[in-house]
Image (cartoon, helix red, strand yellow):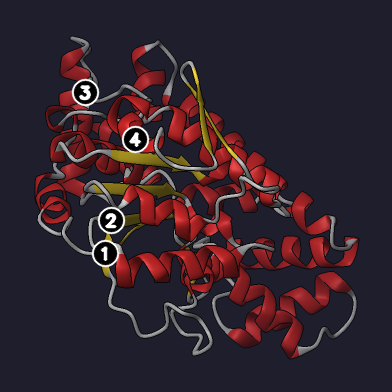
Amino acid sequence: MLFDERPKMKREELFDREKELNELLSNLHRPLILLTGVRRIGKTSLLLVALNESKIPYILIDARKLKENYGFKDLYYLLSTSLSSSLDRLGEVLKKIKGVNILGMSVELSWKGRNYISLADLFDHLNEKRVIIAIDEAQRLRGPLSKEIRDAIAHAYDYDRNLTFILTGSEIGLLYDFLGIEDQTSPLYGRYYYELNLNRFSRSESEGFLEKGFEEYNVKVEKNIIDDIVNFLDGIPGWLTLAGNYLVSGKSLEDVKKISIEIALNEIFNLLESKRKVSEIVSRRYRYVLKCISEGKNTWSKLFECVSEKEGTAISSNTLSNVLHQLEGMSIIQNYEFLDPVYKEACKRLL
């Protein structure tokens, strides 16, 4: 069902991603692949379908589970959980690795002590078989252990020819930052990586997606309603799926818009709260920048004037540049415009 809100698992469940799926499958021989795109664009669905179609044993790591300042304990617990889900595919390899304990259907990794196993050693052992290591929202690996993880991936890039790493990221700039693509001190600097960037649906594709989804539920929706949905949500599959589900359940178009904005606003509040942990001033400045951009301040001078007015002081150019750089890295804005129209509507409601 197209309106199933969970990630898709089979090719026939995807809508109009045949080209991207075949492209990803044809590049699985490469050591490092980046799968990028804005939130709700369908990266996880495309990844899962490709993993299932490839028939190659894989490990799927959901980096969203990591807290911001994670440590070895957190990282190894996440890896243990991911390996536990891979026992049916990799059990024969895992049980031979020192530092890996298999208890029933669970895998335990030692992150300190005599049986400690490094990430590089773990990758070397997994290299016994052809394996894909997929890390969803890999930019969340940024933090205290970035260097150790980059070093291990770079080691595998050079020596573990049976391994392929697929890293997805909705905060594209932060993903590049984690890998050190432009950092000459990074072990991955200058290494070739294949990147597949998922684009939003075109207008006709968005209309076709909604029409087919409604047909699956035998629900008739007027063309003007579909046009309004597409105008508001701008071809982002996750939002279109949300809209389809609520309309099928009897909600009105205005309900859909209200719910979408509330969801986006909650995500913005979470961002501002994370900045508040740094300082109240930092959080407030992010709020003002987002608010001003949502009001159409689409040049440096207009934005600077707007933020300074709300702040009640002339903020420094460096401060504003840093906020803009971070928001671009999180793929929230680009060139003073929101990449997601629902985020724009949500930020208009910031005080």
Q: Mark 1 or 4, which is nearer the eye?
A: 1
State whether residue 217 is above or below residue 174.
above
Q: Which residue is mark 2?
A: 163
**Left or right of 230 in this view: 286:** right
Q: Which one is earlier in the sequence, the residue at label 3 or at label 2?
A: 2
Label 2 – label 4 distance at C-alpha: 35 Å
Q: Which one is earlier in the sequence, the residue at label 1 or at label 3?
A: 1
Q: Observer-nearest residue: 168 or 88?
A: 88
Q: Mark 2 or 4, which is nearer the eye?
A: 2
Q: Which mark is residue 247?
A: none
Which residue sits at x=34%, y=48%?
126
Q: Which one is earlier in the sequence, the residue at label 2 or at label 4?
A: 2
Q: Is residue 170 visible?
A: no
Q: Which mark is residue 31?
A: 1
Please state the horizontal and vertical placement of residue 329, each as a whole percent of the image.
54, 69
Label 3 – label 2 distance at C-alpha: 37 Å
Q: Which mark is residue 240?
A: 4
Which residue sits at x=67%, y=43%?
74
Query: Label 2: few (<14), some or many (≥20) within 10 Å?
Result: many
Q: Quadrant of the N terminus?
A: top left
Please state the horizontal and vertical placement of residue 101, each as a whole percent of the image.
53, 31
Query: Label 1: few (<14), some or many (≥20) within 10 Å?
Result: many
Marks 1 and 2 in Cβ contact (< 8 Å): yes
Q: Which mark is residue 213?
A: 3
> Looking at numbered disc 2 in the image, what kind of residue is underneath it?
Leu
Marks 3 and 2 in Cβ contact (< 8 Å): no
Q: Which one is earlier in the sequence, the residue at label 1 or at label 2?
A: 1
Q: Observer-nearest residue: 308 or 16?
A: 16
Which quarter of the picture shows residue 50?
Answer: top left
Marks 1 and 4 in Cβ contact (< 8 Å): no
Marks 2 and 4 in Cβ contact (< 8 Å): no
